[in-house]
Image (cartoon, rainbow, N blue to C red):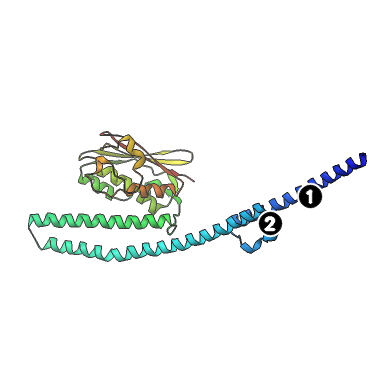
Amino acid sequence: MIYILLIIILFLICLMVFMYTKTENTLGRVEKMIDSVIDDDFEQENFSEHHLSKIEEKLSRYLIQREKRLEDLSAEKTSIQQLVSDLSHQTKTPISNILLYVDLLNEKTDDRELLDLIESIKGQSDKLNFLILSLVKISRLENDIITLNPKKNNVNALFEDTNYILMAREKNIKFYIENCDELYAKFDLKWTREAVFNIVDNAIKYTDFGGEINVSFTRYEFFVRIDIKDNGIGIEENEIPKIFTRFYRCMSASDKDGVGIGLYLSRKIISMQGGYIKVKSKVFKGSVFSIFIPIN
């Protein structure tokens, strides 16, 4: 009787060792699959289905399907890239011609009513041109056709564009920029300057004649914060989460020029560099857009 019990115990121990070894081998092969995916080196023929457990077989099928989806995605990106390139190329010439004809018409007439119509055509053409260029930029950013190249830059470089001052003067808006010669952060100068310009442009656009805009800076351990503060029309609290979505325009801004894509593009550019944007606003009191840009 004792011998039988010993044999049973020995058998169970052997069975446990066998199962443990088999499980370890299976987990080892699964780990090898996962490592190959991480290293972007997964190949279907690397794994023999004859030796795979059900879990391994399913994981292998999933990884094969994943590779196929990535290939399809790559092909789709190439197609989008071509479409964006065609859109940019095919629309550039007609819009330029329209603007040229508008300038020629403007020189050939003194009729006030006709001049107003010509100015309207020019305004709508400029708007269409801006929309197409913005859509092209967004598409290129979202499909990794354009990549950002953050480098250590002086934050002052973001405000070297004198258009800010000229645009503000046209509306008799006081425009103050705090000096920040010793303040540095890591950002792509070209694209971050565009992101900042979109926000400043909105501040000027939605601030009434004779208003005021202040740009100030704060350095933290990991970020530089840029505050763009205006005393314009402000934003309803329930609309603040929506203003960074594509083509969204606040009800209070419906009578102003714009297509509702500038803030979406700004947030995309800043977030792609590890930064973010916060907004505080009160209707008829103004808004503060805070841009946080990583120092490292």
In the rendered image, which quarter is residue 288 located in?
A: top left
Give the labeled residue for mark 1: 18
x and y percentages locating residue 154 in the rendered image: 41, 48
x and y percentages locating residue 24 in the rendered image: 73, 50
In the rendered image, which quarter is residue 107 located in?
A: bottom left
Q: Nearer the viewer, residue 294 or 99?
A: 99
Give the labeled residue for mark 2: 52
Q: Which mark is residue 283?
A: none
Task: Work out whether 271 lies above or below 63.
Answer: above
Secondary element at image label 2: loop
Identify the image quadrant of the N terminus: top right
Dot 2, how many residues are within 10 Å of its Cα: few (below 14), some (14-19), or many (20+)?
A: some
Q: Nearer the viewer, residue 204 or 184?
A: 204
Identity of the amino acid at label 1? Phe
Quick check: 256 left or right of 138?
Answer: left
Task: Work out whether 86 lies above or below 16.
Answer: below
Secondary element at image label 1: helix
Quick check: 75 left or right of 279?
Answer: right
Identity of the amino acid at label 2? Leu
x and y percentages locating residue 61 in the rendered image: 60, 57
Identity of the residue drawn at 33% across and 55% down: 134
Callout count = 2
